[in-house]
Amino acid sequence: MKQKIFTILLIAAAGLSACKKDTVDQNIKEYDETQIQNYIAANSLTGFNRDTVGGDTTGMYYKIINGGTGAPLEYSDKISFVYTLKSFDGKYTSSDTILNHFNEYVGHIEQANLPKGLQIAIHNLLKYRDGSMRLLIPSRLAYGQRGFGTGSISNANSRIAGNQSLDYYIHVINDQQVYDDLVIRNYMTANNLTGYTKTASGLYYKVITPGTGNVGEIGPLSTVTTTYTGALLNGTFFDKSAETTAATFSPGSLNGIEGLVPGVREGLKGHAAKGTSISLILPSTLGYASSPPTGIPVFAPTRFEFQITDVTN
């Protein structure tokens, strides 16, 4: 008899627990839907569709900007994409597509601390390379009750608060070299940079001060003394160690000319000499590509400024 009573109590407790969970799930769905509808109205957003793939369960809203090309993306496909995001409360904004760059498998998006909703949307809604969309992710498919980041939510851009829905823009890159060239040209236009020459490889260079030596004198066996800086196109310097104190690149070592990234090698060997000041803007394929050192995002175009003080062979 006692065993039967205990069993009945367990079943009743399980039933109450299930009812409570369903109520919580329903409440957060209603909360997210209200958040999204209010956000759409407050920002006068138009052209958004509700995600109904798989039975209208995600609560996401999306707008395809560019439909993309090729075969539909699978979770096992490795992709490269850039993105921007902001929380609905306006306290977190991340709009730098130089830094916000993902390069991994579709199925690993969530493992990279990006929202589960983003992974679902790229696979089910955007679907193609070279596609772009704007996406409104409900909090339950974003960072949930705990939010994301460190510090106080009162400090702008330090933390995404709990139960915050997110506004994403995503562009899946199809051809990295084409995308990088567009980024570089936009960067030069925005910063009024003129006088650059584009080589067949995609390198942009500008000789600011012609050298006293002969162009072509820098080669694999050259010892080159130079001051230089290296920066991302968002203005962040990743190398200023030799800005005022000259560095020397010597043959037969990892720090020789042949140890530099391809775009810098091309620029110095093909267009510089002793006394030359030269500016180089590299697409990521001529820079650090998918394996950059710490402080440089994957597939980030870069800019170098060199002042060659001495060349010996």
Image (spheres, rainbow, N blue to C red):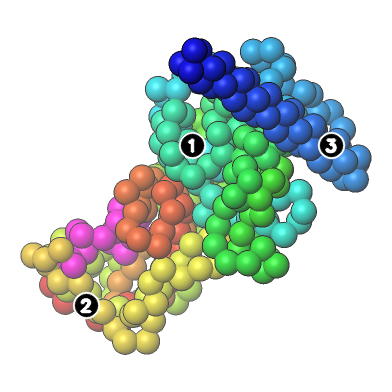
The amino acid marked with disc number 2 is Thr
Residue at the image point whose x is 46% and y is 29% from the top: 106
Residue located beneath label 2 in the image? 248
Element on which disc 3 rests? helix
Residue 110 is tagged as 1
Span colored in magenta: 255-270
Query: Reading the chain from its start, which is encountered first: label 3 or label 1?
Result: 3
The first of marks 1 and 2 along the sequence is 1
Circle nearer the viewer, 3 or 2? 3
Q: Secondary structure at mark 2?
A: strand
Question: Residue 235 has which mark?
Answer: none
Magenta stretch: dominant secondary structure = helix
Foreground tag (1 vs 2): 1
Q: Quadrant of residue 276?
A: bottom left
In this rendering, is residue 223 above or below 182? Answer: below
Q: Name the residue that disc number 3 marks.
A: 34
Where, quadrant-wise, is the C terminus in this rendering? bottom left
Q: Residue at x 19, y 59 (%)?
A: 258
Q: Amino acid at mark 1?
A: Glu
